Image: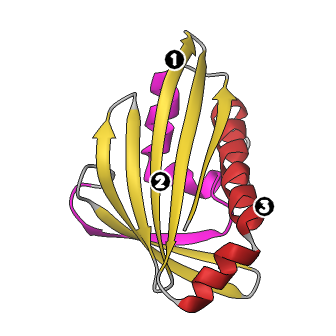
Amino acid sequence: MLSYTSEILINKPITTCFTEIVNLDSMKHWQEGLISFAHISGTPRKIGSTIQLNYQFGKRKMELTESVTHRKDNHSIHFNFDTKMMHNVQQNFFEIIDDDTTKWISHNQFLPRNFTSRIMLFLMPKAFKKQSKKYLINFKNYVENGTSIIKK
């Protein structure tokens, strides 16, 4: 198992940050590798909903199922992400620093489903932390400046 916390300050009000984190259409602007998503069940980004996320990192393709396990508007949203190899619990909290600044705190826990993924977590914990931090930075840039990762 691998557990860690990442956080970032975003120079936008909490309502703006939360609106964007739950907006499925904005994910492509800050989640590097995301190529598509498909609604599976429930009301998108509400408790109990599921979507399929498809990523590509170089030649490696990855399919995840995202389930929303908790949501308190303008405060927190928690997800489970599942693949054949890994179960990831992500708890996201948003705190008001002032009227124009929000802190996003993301707790991640990765639980391997097989021996190969156990080895991967053991050998490459920094890669998981680096990817999480990159998403936080990309989100910050998108929310603050409208900077998208989409190559034009």
**Looking at the rendering, which quadrant does residue 33 occupy?**
bottom right
Q: Residue at x 49, y 30 (%)?
A: 94
Residue ID for mark 1:
96
Q: Position of residue 116 (x, y in %)?
A: 61, 90
The residue type indicated by label 2 comes to: Gln
**Looking at the rendering, which quadrant does residue 124 occupy?**
bottom right
Q: Position of residue 15 (x, y in %)?
A: 45, 24
For the record, the magenta segment spans 14-43
Horizontally, is 141 left or right of 63 in the view?
A: right
Mark 1 to mark 3 CA distance (whole Å): 32 Å
Horizontally, is 115 left or right of 82 in the view?
A: right
Mark closer to the chain start, 2 or 3: 2
Residue 131 at least partly seen: yes
Q: Residue at x 63, y 58 (%)?
A: 31
Task: In the rendered structure, find residue 151 and report the number of the disc placed on it.
Answer: 3
Q: Is residue 45 above or below residue 32?
A: above
Horizontally, is 71 left or right of 56 in the view?
A: left
In magenta segment, residue 29: yes
In magenta segment, residue 131: no
Element type at mark 2: strand
Mark closer to the chain start, 2 or 1: 2
Residue 148 at least partly seen: no
Task: In the rendered structure, find residue 20 and report the number of the disc placed on it.
Answer: none
Q: Residue at x 64, y 37 (%)?
A: 7
